[in-house]
Structure formats: structure tokens, C-alpha cells
Image (tube, helix red, strand yellow):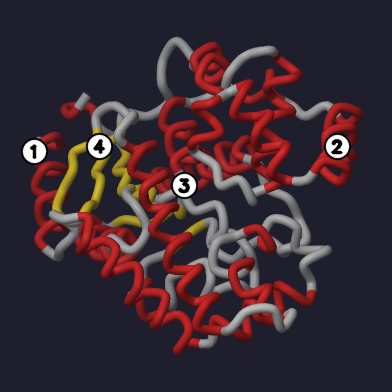
Amino acid sequence: MADRADLIVICGPTATGKTAAAASLARLLDGEVVSADSMQIYQGLRIGTAQPTPEEMAGVPHHLVGFLPPEEGFSVADYVARATQCIREIRARGRMPIVAGGTGLYLSSLVNGIDFTVMRGAPQLRARLEAELMQQGAEAMYRRLQQADPEAAARLCPADRVRVLRALEWYEQTGQTARARIARSRPAQKPFCPLLFGLMTAERAQLYARIDARVDAMLQAGLLSEARHVYTHRAQYRTAAQAIGYKEFFSYFEGTATLEDCTALLKRASRRYAKRQLTWFRHMEGIVWLNADPAAVGEMARRWQQCSE
């Protein structure tokens, strides 16, 4: 695959420097960045979703960041279609596409060319599941998913109602687990030949320290105001209201928890999310793991040059 590589992918758990690495590598290789983050898509939610700032972009074009109103839904099928189009357009400009992000389902579906035409939603089934959610609660629906598709459940947070319902919908519609459906939906020939790079710290404690520091920086940058905005519009911002970085502060706004407790809850939720990300990426084939430091960018460029010669 290396001698035919036509795409670079940078993945890894949260707070490992994927954004900075992608921008630096793009400057070296005359590239453009395509985000693979399920929350960075939303307009007006810059801090909690860790959207790259203009300074972090450093003049490099970034795609699929802050383009969608928070009221609108966005599926993995939508992502694959849009990201594929972005990659084609970047290539047409004679530039290097670099996909970077931490949403494992987005990345694996993109590089494997998953066909989602057999996974379209069933409105009546979705309406029934939503009614059952209201009657039984999120925990009960998550337990159902654990019984039906334990592997899919392990990759989701029980409070992520949107994705839990979507996973249940797909299971009840097809009678297959997520892994079986994806395997059936893979094309005979993949659409890309990517170089896959994963960023990770040498020690898990280092990653957790990065996560804690990132949460503190977000709060200093105005995260609480952004979270209050999401809380106020939570009925309209259904997906964002379930996102890590916002929902942890809802009890503070309701006067039932302190800011310190909610901040600690966010740090814990972020660490747990990082563990789920690692579990996902370690099941993806072909990832070259690099230490999350500035030297990683040089190593990525070196390996790309080797397979371009």
C-alpha cells in the first residue's frame, strides 16, 4: 500500500495534538486538511468541540469545520459523502489531502469506502425507538444495545442518546451487528490507499495530564458561556447537547452541582472517551503509531516521501 499511498490520515485520542500536526504537515506537503470530528462540524461551538483557531490553521485550508447549524443532524453517511468530495477537490487542485480527527467511525468508514445505501434510516422504526427512549430512559436503551451489539455499545457513551438509538435502529433494521454490516458494505476495492498515523503519548498518565490541561484552557477561553448557550438551546441542539464538553455543565446551570464538580466530571468523561478512541483505533489495520510530540510531523513527512519516490 505504501508505494501507492494517495491520502494521509492522522488519528488518535483527544488532546494528542492532531490539529497542530495536520496543519504542520500540510505546510510541509502543500496540503489541505479535512476534519474527521463529529462535533467540530457545528457552527458557533468552537471551544467545546476544539475547532482549530485561525492561528492553529496557520493559513492552511481546513474543511468540514464549523459549517453546519447545530439544529441539523449529520450522519456518518453524510460525512463519508462530504469528505470524499473534499478529497477529490483537493486532489484536483494538485494539493495533498490530509484527514485528521478522532471520530473512529468516520475515519474507518471513509478509508474503507463503506456503502451506506443499505443502512438508510426507517422513519417508523426510529419514531418507535424514540418513544421507547422517552418511556424507558437512556440507560435502558443502552442496556438493550449491550445485549444486541456489545461491541458497538462499548464504543459509545450511555448518555449519547442519538448514537445509541441509531445503533439500535440499524441493528433492528438489519438484524446484524455494526461490524457485520460494515463488513458487508465494504467495496471490492477501497477508494483510497492511505498512510495512517496514530498519535499517542508514551504513558497513559501523560495523556490524562494533557486532557486535564486542555479542559482548564477551554474554561479560560470561555467554555462555560458556550455550554450555557447549548443548554439554553438543548431542545434544538440535540446532538451537541449530548456532546462531551457541554452536558457535564448542565447540572451547574440547574443549580444542583458546583462548577468544580462539573469540571471534574468533564475531565473524567474526556479520559473515558480517550480510552474508547484508543480501543477503536487499535482495531483499525495499518496504523503507524507515533509519539505525540513535534518530531512526529517530520516522521510522517519522511514516510510520505519514501512512498512517493
**Which circle's residue, 2 or 3, is located before the other in the chain?**
3
**Which circle's residue, 2 or 4, is located before the other in the chain?**
2
Q: Mark 1–mark 2 contact, CB under 8 Å?
A: no
| Mark 3 → mark 1, Cα distance in angstroms | 28 Å
**Which circle's residue, 3 or 1, is located before the other in the chain?**
3
| Mark 4 → mark 1, Cα distance in angstroms | 11 Å
Label 1 element class: helix
Residue at the image point whose x is 49% and y is 77% from the top: 263
| Mark 1 → mark 2, Cα distance in angstroms | 54 Å
Q: Quadrant of residue 17?
A: bottom left
Residue at which label 2 appears: 132
Label 2 CA crowd tier, 10 Å (few <14, some 14–19, many 20+)? some
Mark drawn on residue 57: none
Mark drawn on residue 195: 4
Residue furthest to the front in view is: 256
Label 1 CA crowd tier, 10 Å (few <14, some 14–19, many 20+)? few
| Mark 4 → mark 3, Cα distance in angstroms | 17 Å
Residue at the image point whose x is 55% and y is 34% from the top: 153
Viewer-side residue, 133 vs 33: 133
Residue 208 appears in view: yes
Say left or right for 296 vs 63: left
**Which circle's residue, 1 or 2, is located before the other in the chain?**
2
Residue at which label 3 appears: 103
| Mark 2 → mark 4, Cα distance in angstroms | 43 Å
